[in-house]
Image (spheres, rainbow, N blue to C red):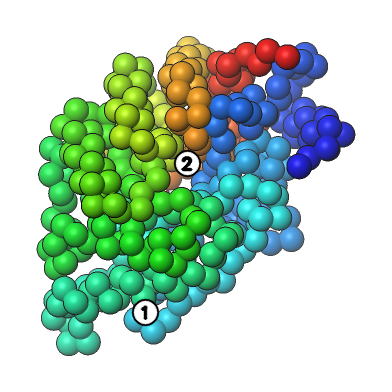
Amino acid sequence: MKTQTAVKSAVLVGFMAIGLAMPAQTPTSLKHAYQGCFLVGAALNASQFTGATPRNFALITTQFNSISPENVLKWEVVHPKPETYDFSLADKYVEFGQTNHMFVIGHNLVWHAQTPKWVFEDEKGNPLSREALLKRMRDHIHTVVGRYKGRINGWDVVNEALNEDGTLRQSPWMKIIGDDYIEKAFEYAHEADPKAELYYNDYSLENEAKRKGALDLVKKLKAKGVPINGVGLQDHVHMDWPTADQIDNTISEFGKLGMNVMITELDIDVLPQATPSQTADVSLNIAADPKLNPYPNGLPESVQQQLANRYADLFAAYAKHCGLVTRVTLWGVTDADSWKNDWPVKGRTNYPLLFDRGAQPKPAFKAVIQAAPRKTS
Ligand code: XIL
């Protein structure tokens, strides 16, 4: 447990780290503002947790009490070749989280993207049999989850298994193993670390058809006694989607099934939408066009304010479900780090997070702090 003095000095560092003058009673950090409601996390890239002076160290440790690995625990990074595991970055990530007493997330074990092609093939390049792929999945999960047993607190076990219409995506996992690949992944993860929390993670679950697909999936898993603790709503959102009502209903519905709900990859896109549908499909690559990049030299004040209001509304919607929502994680720390500068269109200047390119708090930061439930003392 932290002592009062440690908490006070952390708050003081908070003032200094974010360069804000706020009245003494106003919480100066996200994690303190939402204490007792949910954890507040950030996805980190390697430069933020490696090296003698990890980038934005003070900002990260003062603001967040949970971390997610943006890329370093994905299959292509930790297990690039059949007989080769490379934990050099993942070890540093986990060590960073432990040293700073954070709730450490593993992302992710079974996904169709950022997974090498060889995973699904034999030495001759032919598709693997169901049995061989299940064995490969089990070996991978046991090796990775087993290595961090007791140190990684929660795992995104299966990522993005659903299509937009709520049916199961025809990924190589699904095609070769069949739809029980999902329960197998959870079972293997539970065998490897029985105490770790295990989650299903996906995007656009606020949309009705996909939400229904995910609810049915969770019901099915629960009926079979599969060890699943929670559902991650990625929430790569836009200014006008999803609505607060959609979020509210989605969280409630998963809650009714006994799931914890986490917001796992929050960012807000202020740029013109490059695709007609709401998606976070990492394989998209849309041609650059100046019309899609309207703010290369800075965000106009009016849009900055709209972004702050949108952030406040989202956090208020999440905080309505304190406790059922156990964590809200931002997908990055500063606007400079965000994947949204290069996805789904390369080379745009986007503004999706709470800290600007100079790591200074944006109006949205203050709006999120002010949206926190008031604590009664
Ligand atoms: C993204 C990373 O942020 C990028 O750096 C990488 O190039 C592609 O993947 N859904 C997920 C995340 O579950 O793993 C993705 O992260 C964003 C969408």
Residue farthest to the bottom, as pictured: 124
- For mark 2, give the secondary structure: loop
Kindly identify the residue that appears in the image at 16 percent across and 51 percent down: 169
Residue type for callout 1: Lys
- Residue at 44 percent of width and 73 percent of height: 143
For numbered disc 1, what is the local secondary structure?
loop
Residue that label 1 marks: 81
Q: Please, what is the three-letter code of the amino acid marked with disc 2?
A: Trp
Percent x, y for residue 30?
A: 62, 29
Disc 2 residue lies near ligand 1 with CB under 8 A:
yes
Q: Is residue 45 above or below residue 11?
A: below
Would you say 133 lies left or right of 370 here?
Answer: left
Residue 217 in the image, given as x and y percentages of width and height: 21, 44
Residue wearing tag 2? 331
Q: Nearer the viewer, residue 283 or 170?
A: 170
Towards the viewer: 125 or 137: 137
Q: Which mark is residue 173?
A: none
Is residue 276 positioned above or below 264 on the image?
Answer: above
Measure the C-alpha gap from mark 1 to mark 2: 28 Å
Q: Residue at x 36, y 75 (%)?
A: 139
